[in-house]
Image (cartoon, rainbow, N blue to C red):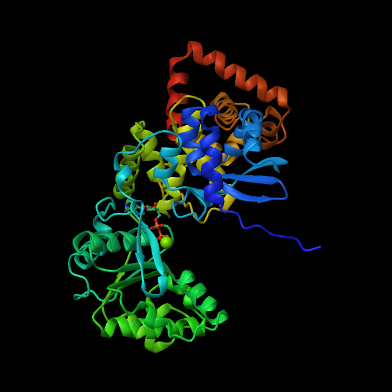
Amino acid sequence: MVEIVQMIDKKAMWEKILGAIFGFIDRGHLLTIFVNSAVISYENGVLLIGFASIIGPDYVKEKYHAKIFPVIKDIYPDLVSVEYEMKSSLIDDDYPDKLPVDTFMSVIGTQRKERKVPNKQEVILEGGMRSKILNKRYTLQNFIAGSENRLVHAACLAVGAKPAGIYNPLYIYGDVGLGKTHLLQATGQEILKNFPNKKVVYMTAEHFINKIIDAIGKKHTKPFKDEYRNLDCLIVDDIQFFANKATSEQEFFHTFNDLYDNGKQIILSADRPPRELDGFDDRLKSRFGMGMLIEISKPSFETRLAILKAKCAEYEIMLDPEVVEFIAFNVTQSVREMIGVLVTAIGEAQLENATPTIRTVAQVIRKLNREQGAETIDMRDQQKSVVRGLEDVVDIVAKYFSLTKSDLVGSDRKKEVMTPRQITMYLIREILNQSYESIGDCFGGRNHTTVMHACNKVVNQMKIDPKLQRDIGALKKELGF
Ligand code: ADP
Ligand code: MG
């Protein structure tokens, strides 16, 4: 039997489904959980829906599944079941099957101010090739350039004002999540804003490679560079992916030279400077360096704060300044991660009809840390750090009372040690929500009733002892709560 595999347009499918179900869903949940969702697959009657929010899948299953399942089945009679999963990459605007925010808003009945502007600019090239990846949300105006990235921002503006001038090629490099794609696309748009008739194409190196593989597969003999000949500006993102792909690199080399020799602007990004690109032809590396090479740096605390504030304004959400600062302090390695934490925290808080607190934000950061390893979120060098476990509480209390950690977890029954020990147990219970048993284990295998007694004692004592109250308040603040 021949099985017919039907290609589904997941975006169109999700648009249709959302249009049918949004009326069943709380507005707050639409704007937080569903705004970063998509159809992941639809196979053999099983529809898998992804959410960027950590709690999205469970929540939707519990609260909405029964209501929305029959509605979806009405549209897709073959539907057998609907499953939900978390997919953190859905936070990205560029996730391929995600609806653009404007489309999403109009599906759920909210008109955005800039609704009339098409989200993507399409350029049809010779041979029907299209560029459609310029995301209107990335502009040079909404890129927050702190002092560390003023130069790269200025170079982009200069290219936007005068393409193929002295900054050609413009080569921007730096770590992931720092805004390279944003700047590349924004520069493309700046050129189009200033010169609406120019042909600008943005593509990722991967996209370029796929096109070449495709062309080879179809035995296209026309040189690749000819297809790009009429461009005024070619933008290629993440060129490190050309490494060791000799054929693609060769084609890119020809395209690059052809455009460059004809006075066209080229903008490139990579995760490292040209000299460190492995598996690249030396001629190509030296050509990359002919124009302007700039590193995009990690934003400073002030810049991170400004980015978060701008995001809050964009989402029309007011947050406690301490909460915003807390995120900026603790998520330092990637702007993408930082925005992800903000959006997730807002989403989770809205489920409870609340606003994010330091506590909820700390939880989001901890979850992300666990999920991704601590590499992307580095909290080591920050003054205010997220409490990650019992150890941190013990550390901070020990310091506060000028004791050692072993004093705290040991068995000395002197009052100067006993009270801080009880306070530590109370804080671990209160902040980390640990069971009496596990706290007991941490304190040299004490019985859970001992821990319970200690916690109760602190609670009762606080009612009559203002100093204890102040100590606990101060400690909580130090712990970020
Ligand atoms: P990269 O391509 O370097 O991995 P992106 O350009 O995709 O990073 O940036 C990740 C996210 O962070 C995007 O949503 C982008 O708009 C945002 N972002 C990064 N830096 C800034 C900044 N300085 N100002 C505003 N938004 C920023
Ligand atoms: Mg990128």
Residue most extreme to the bottom: 283
Q: Quadrant of ligand 2?
A: bottom left
Residue closer to the observer: 338 or 428: 338
- Please state, as top left, top right, bottom left or bottom right, where the N terminus lies in the image: bottom right
Task: Give the farthest residue toward the top.
Answer: 464
Does 258 appear above or below 115?
Answer: below
- Residue 184 appears at what percent x and percent y? 33, 63
Q: Residue at x 47, y 20 (%)?
A: 468
Res 106 quadrant in image? top left
Q: Position of residue 403 (x, y in %)?
A: 52, 36
Rendering coords of residue 14 (x, y %): 54, 44
218 or 35, which is in the foreground? Answer: 218
Does residue 36 appear in the picture of this structure?
yes
In the rendered image, which quarter is residue 421 located in? Answer: top right
Q: Nearer the viewer, residue 164 or 386?
A: 164
Give the residue displayed 46% in from the left and 46% down from the top: 340
Q: Nearer the viewer, residue 336 or 189?
A: 189
Image: 82 above or below 416: below
